[in-house]
Image: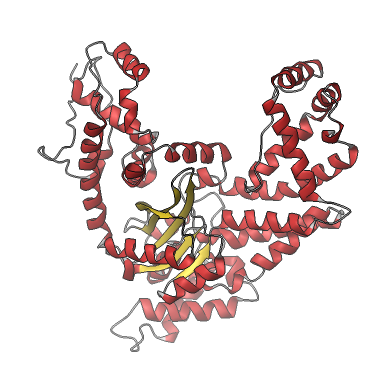
Amino acid sequence: MGSRRVQMASPGRKRCRNMAELQAITVPQQVSQGDELLKHHLLKMLVTDLLPFSKVKDVGFRAFCRGLNPTFDPPSSALWVRTELQSVYEYIKAEVHNMLQSVPEVALTAEMWTHTSEGVYLTVSCHFIDRYWKRRNCLLETVALGSDRAAAHVVEQLLKTSSDWGIAEKVKVVMSNVKSKDSMTESCEAKGWVHMRCFVCTLDIMFREALAQLDKPSWRMPLLLRKCRAIVRFFQQDRDAQRQLRANQEKLNLSPLRLVQAAVDDTWLDMGTMLQRLSQQRDAINLVLLQHVKEDLWLNDRDMEKINAVLAALQPLRDTAKEMVSDGYESLSNIIPLVDNLQKSMARLSEDGNQVAKALADVCMRLFGHAGDNRWMALSTAMDPRFKNIMLFSSRAQTIEQKLQVELKALCPSKDASPLGFGTEEVDAILTEYKSTNTMVRDQNPLDFWRLPRGFKKLSHVARKYLTVVSTAVPLQRAFNPEISRRVHHSRCHLEPENVNLMMFLNGHWSIESSNSPESE
């Protein structure tokens, strides 16, 4: 059978002609394809799993490679790995840079994360919708911020990165997970950008502020959470207690689930998982605590009443997360409909006397109550054919249509129209026709609607602008999956500092996942 030999990219060799060729992985049709193909897969593995370059020196790893192919002598030099990957990086970077020059406008996402020993890093990505109406996401740079978390410093780095990539003038909106929203907003506005806080980050803030409201004598939620963390810590540190817990789980016909720890700064998902496990395993846990005379950690009925109230109040947030779970990113247009459903669910729970839900509803109203007044949220929702009726047939309809008229006249100039663009009658006709179209179902791709030729196609200029902005600063599969999030964080914290940017960039553009994603098609 025939086979294809894949050459490694290196400075002295012919480059692949496009990113698709770089991203493609050839499945060997014979057992042996030569060292070059195996080295190619080795580099892909390091990039995909964010492994340190020193992995190629590990005795066990080298033995495993030879076990798969006794004739293959895997490279043992970290310098060789860096040289090869640097070559791929330079090529892809040039390709992405050239591609971005033809894009009219982009949105930025800024993810701030903390390295366990090297301080704060900032990962910057850009997002746009291409001419085929496919959402494109390009990781641009990961830079060390040291210990400086100031919003002004973050925005200066965003400006430097976007300038280096030639897109500073194309940026309109920055979506970040930076907690200091007000100062980020002010710093972005000083550069002519709009700042929006990541939806996932906002949900976490909502949960923390709601719990803070419940720090009163009748609830003392922070105190209960400290107790729950202490219970988990006890079982993690005492092997006898672990064995007894497993025995009690078997005796009581409970699932043999391990307890999960949630740190003070963990997300509501982590906190919910910890409380859910404690609720499920309460009887088995209390039997062990009784044997070890740990009455201070005993989960009494009042504790369980509070825990169950928290879990019930978190269910609407879990439902929201399920609505958003997908690969990659979703448009900002999802937020208003999701928040609307979230508020309705919280209201029902509040009416039933759930104090946690009431606190969440109060904070949710403060954080999202004026989302419809936000131009980017409102117009992205109006331009999403799944949710357009929420905005175009509401009390805000007149205001929304006026904003769309301004956008149409500014974005779609016409020789036969006024100096601003379309005439008023033409604009009204376009909006009327768009309003009369059928809405799409929730699980359809709104970009498919705008890809098709239509009589109001000129409105697609506005749709592309507003649907370009994404709702989260991190991909959704990581945003709502603590296990994946922890795994990624663990991996990137074990990268050598000098290789963080190189590996994060290639992980976004040249990993096995990115090769199989819709954006790489």
Residue at 53 percent across and 39 percent down: it is 486
Dividing the picture into quadrants, the one containing residue 491 is: top left
Which of 320 and 250 lies nearest the eye of the viewer?
250
Residue at 66 percent across and 40 percent down: it is 262
Q: Is residue 292 left or right of residue 110?
A: right
Residue 50 at what x, y percent from top left? 39, 36
Q: Compared to 227, does 114 lie above or below?
A: below
* Image quarter in which the C terminus is found: top left
Which of 381 and 208 lies nearest the eye of the viewer?
208
Q: Examine the rendering and report whether any part of residue 376 can be seen.
A: no
Which of 372 and 198 lies nearest the eye of the viewer?
198
Residue 170 at what x, y percent from top left? 34, 68
Residue at 45 percent across and 81 percent down: it is 406
Q: Examine the rendering and report whether any part of residue 244 can be seen.
A: yes
Residue 15 at what x, y percent from top left? 14, 41
* Image quarter in which the N terminus is found: top left
Q: Is residue 235 left or right of residue 415?
A: right
Residue 11 at what x, y percent from top left? 13, 40
